Image: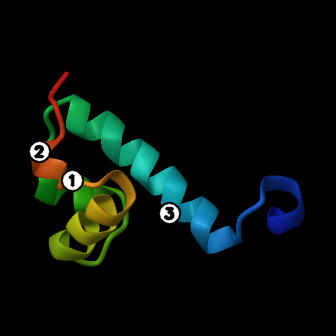
Amino acid sequence: MFRSDLGMTFPQWRTQLRLHHALILLTGRTPVTAVAHRCGWSSTSAFIEVSRRTFGHTPGSHPAG
């Protein structure tokens, strides 16, 4: 259902949702480690790698709001 309706698998959709929430937290100046854990990544380094692959930069370099 996810693939036909949204063009992505459930895990891809879930990652997009987690990244969206992470961006909101980062804009509010929440520390990267706290963002990683609040958004469900098992480690900060895993979150940083997904963020780098998706956005082309690490979350620490994300412009603050």
Q: Residue at x 15, y 40 (%)?
A: 30
Say which amino acid is labelled 2: Ser
Q: Residue at x 53, y 52 (%)?
A: 17
What's the CA distance linking mark 2 and mark 3? 20 Å
Q: Residue at x 41, y 52 (%)?
A: 19
The quarter of the picture where the C terminus appears is: top left
- Which disc is residue 61 wearing? 2
Mark 3 and mark 2 in contact (Cβ < 8 Å)? Answer: no
- Which disc is residue 18 wearing? none
Say which amino acid is labelled 3: Thr
Q: Secondary structure at mark 3?
A: helix
> Which residue carries the number 3 mark?
15
Q: Nearer the viewer, residue 56 or 30?
A: 56
The quarter of the picture where the N terminus appears is: bottom right
Mark 2 and mark 1 in contact (Cβ < 8 Å)? Answer: yes
Location of residue 5 (image quadrant): bottom right
Location of residue 12 (image quadrant): bottom right
Image depth: mark 3 or mark 1 in front:
1
Q: Position of residue 63 (x, y in %)?
A: 16, 31
> Which residue carries the number 1 mark?
57
